[in-house]
Amino acid sequence: MKRYVIYGAMAVFLVATVISVVIQMQGGKEEKGYLEFRVKKGKVSEIINATGEIRPATGAQISLGARVTGTVVKEPISVGDRVKKGDLIAIIDNRELRQDVKRTLAELERIKVRYENLIKEKEQEIKGLEKELMNARLEEKRAESEFRFRKWNFNSMEALFKSRNHSVSERAFREARNDFVQARHGWKEALNSIQAAQAALTKAKIGLKRLKGEYLQERKKAEAELRKSRIRLSYSELRAPFSGVITYVSTQEGETVVAGLNAPQFVKILDESRVENWIYVDETDIGRIRDGMEVSFTVDAYPDVSFMGSIDKIYPAPVIQNNVVYYIAVVRIFRDAQRLHLKMTTHNQIHARTLRDVLVVPNGAVKFLDGHYVVRLKGAKGKGFVRVETGISDSKFTQIRSGLKEGDVVLYRP
């Protein structure tokens, strides 16, 4: 029995010691039933309390649906499953779609083979015509040289024949003239051959250009059909557009879905990292709320955890709940968002105004007496109450505008 009494006394001593340490850490000490607090400069915020709820951010939760008609042959997910971007959600019977892809792919290959062979043949034809044109030009050069020689020879023979100074027979003169006429005819034929070869080459090049144009058009059409068929095939495989958690499943394997004006909904996917805190601010307080104000809030699931963020946007349209007008202030970015779930109730403290380096005292030290705010100052005459002018208050401290100075000690009951 004595041992239990000793243990009890030790426990009481330990509790008293802990309380004393906590009091010292808060800046005061216990004296005759009062706590002491030395007036100091600190930070104090004007707090607006409001209730809210966790909502998905825009685009954070989507409904995934089907764009083709058919039977669901595979659906390996269920509510609560976590998926990564690209993970398979469901497959709709796509045998016909796969055959369509094969058909359009085969058509594209057929066009490639046909036109590539035609283009190769035309290119070989052009090479042959270019060679013919080169030979025709060489032949024209030779024919021109022959013509000029025969012309010179004929002119010489003609002059000698007409001068009667040399012995040039009429036969020789006529042979020279015939050779000249034949050479002139041969040169003209060579020139015509060049023109014909050039025309044939130009025509072949035009044909090649036209053939390449047809090939480009036909290939583009076939490639477009192939893309369409592959896109239609992709519609039969539903994949996660981003990483998240499955929050809703409406279709099971074996069911037939019919794609119409509205895509049949398969699942809902939520990106848990992209949630918002919708704070319902009373219309009497909305005038003091601004974008960028700091917000701390808790949820019932984690009462000892304080989530921090700032107001990103204030919606202009009001909402009415229980005949009370509220405006929505949205907090979008805060830490540990993945711990929060949709529809959780949030208890918010909006830091409407923050003052730094101002005199502060604990809220419990300020009393309202005879129409004035007072504090009990250690060492003051009488009951020790002195009149003060207060400013804003938060959950711990009250601003003192006048009546006290830094270092004064006030007494208060916790």
Image: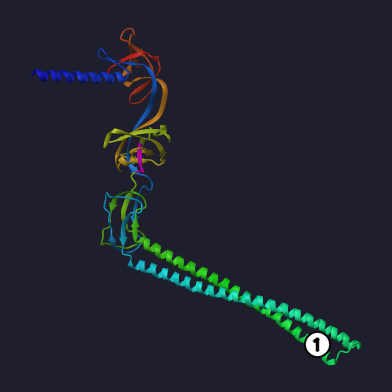
Q: Circle 1 — which element?
A: helix
Residue 279 highlighted magenta (yes or no): yes
Is residue 383 or residue 271 the one in the foreground? 271
Residue 300 visible (yes or no): no
- Snapshot quadrant of residue 314: top left
Is residue 32 or residue 326 the one in the foreground? 32
Is residue 138 or residue 31 the one in the foreground? 138
**Residue at the spot x=91%, y=87% of the render?**
163
In the displayed structure, 359 sits above or below 115; it is: above
Label 1, on which residue? 176
Q: Which residues are magenta?
A: 273-280
Residue at the extreme left of the image, as rendered: 1
Q: Amino acid at mark 1?
A: Ala
Residue 115 highlighted magenta (yes or no): no
**Snapshot colouring:** rainbow
Is residue 361 or residue 233 the one in the foreground? 233
- Snapshot quadrant of residue 125: bottom right
- Give the side of residue 274 with respect to residue 147, left or right: left
Q: Quadrant of the N terminus?
A: top left
Residue 22 x/y as whole percent = 28, 21
